[in-house]
Image: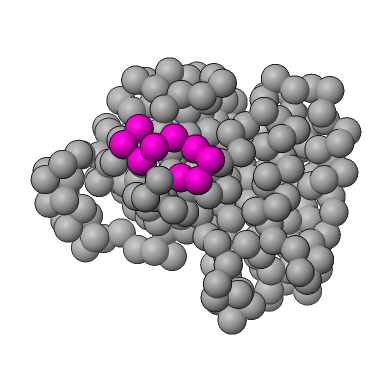
Amino acid sequence: MSEHDDETYRPDGLTYGLLLVRATRDDVLRVLVRERFSGWVGPAQDGWVVAVADRPRGHVAARRRYLPDVGELVSGDLHAVVVTVVVARDLLLQVWAHDDGAEVVTYLSDAHLAFPDDEDAFGPQGAHGARTLAALAGRPDAGDELTTLLSDERGESDAESERLMAVCRLLGWPQWLVAVDSLPRRVPGGPDADAFTRLRAGRTGVGGLLAARAAAVVRRDE
């Protein structure tokens, strides 16, 4: 994942990262446990299982994998569609989509913010993948509208969670995705907290607490 200049981010903006997996919850849990994922795995809803990372922009699994790396792995292992979403302080939205392990969509809402040292980086990148993303979500008719939505530059007073909420409406994704930063408390508009399985380095309960301490030695937030 790209490094970002923290001085360009609002300190109060939301930061969160998640996977949307088109597979059964049991299969998703199996792979995430094996890969020592740290985060929460929610219930299946409308054909999607949501896994929320506890380090959205850092290492979240074995071998110091970042969230998009885990998305690619899960997609290949389950021969499934996996969409990875990361929002950084509500100023930057990044989306990756994998189908059967192959990366088919890469999007970021502000190239300059993602790559401040690149003088040629400007505006949204990857909006042309919107039609593919809509098709993967089973909403091909939403492709044109999604392209327009992802092509828009964010205004100074806008939050990327608002853009993500609009994406969720178009693609039929759970709209509570924009509130997952509330975990381990209840997700507003979403499932109760106890509907999520808490994994720490792939384990639950006390074993997970011990595993998380060991993993913290090598895993980093950025």
Name the image quarter holding the C terminus.
Answer: bottom left
Provide the major secondary structure of the magenta segment.
Answer: loop
Residue 45 is covered by the magenta coloring: no
Query: What colouring method underlies this structural image?
Result: one colour
**Magenta segment, which residues?**
187-195
Return the x and y of residue 115 as percentages of the image width and height: 67, 68
In the image, 166: left or right of 15? Answer: right
Q: Residue at x 78, y 71 (%)?
A: 156
Residue furthest bottom in the image: 7
Where residue 88 sits, quadrant-wise, is bottom right
Where residue 52 sits, quadrant-wise, is top left
Residue 190 is covered by the magenta coloring: yes
Return the x and y of residue 139 as percentages of the image width and height: 75, 22
Q: Is residue 171 above or below residue 111?
A: above
In the image, 215: left or right of 6? Answer: left
Numbered marks: total: 0
Return the x and y of residue 142 as percentages of the image width and height: 82, 28
Q: Residue at x 20, y 39 (%)?
A: 203
Q: Residue at x 27, y 33 (%)?
A: 33
In the image, 148: left or right of 150? Answer: right
Q: Residue at x 70, y 52 (%)?
A: 162
Q: Is residue 85 above or below residue 44?
A: below
**Residue 77 seen in render:** no
Return the x and y of residue 56 as percentages of the image width and height: 46, 55
In the image, 53: left or right of 212? Answer: right
**Residue 110 seen in render:** yes
- Front residue (pair 100, 166): 166
- Front residue (pair 172, 60): 172
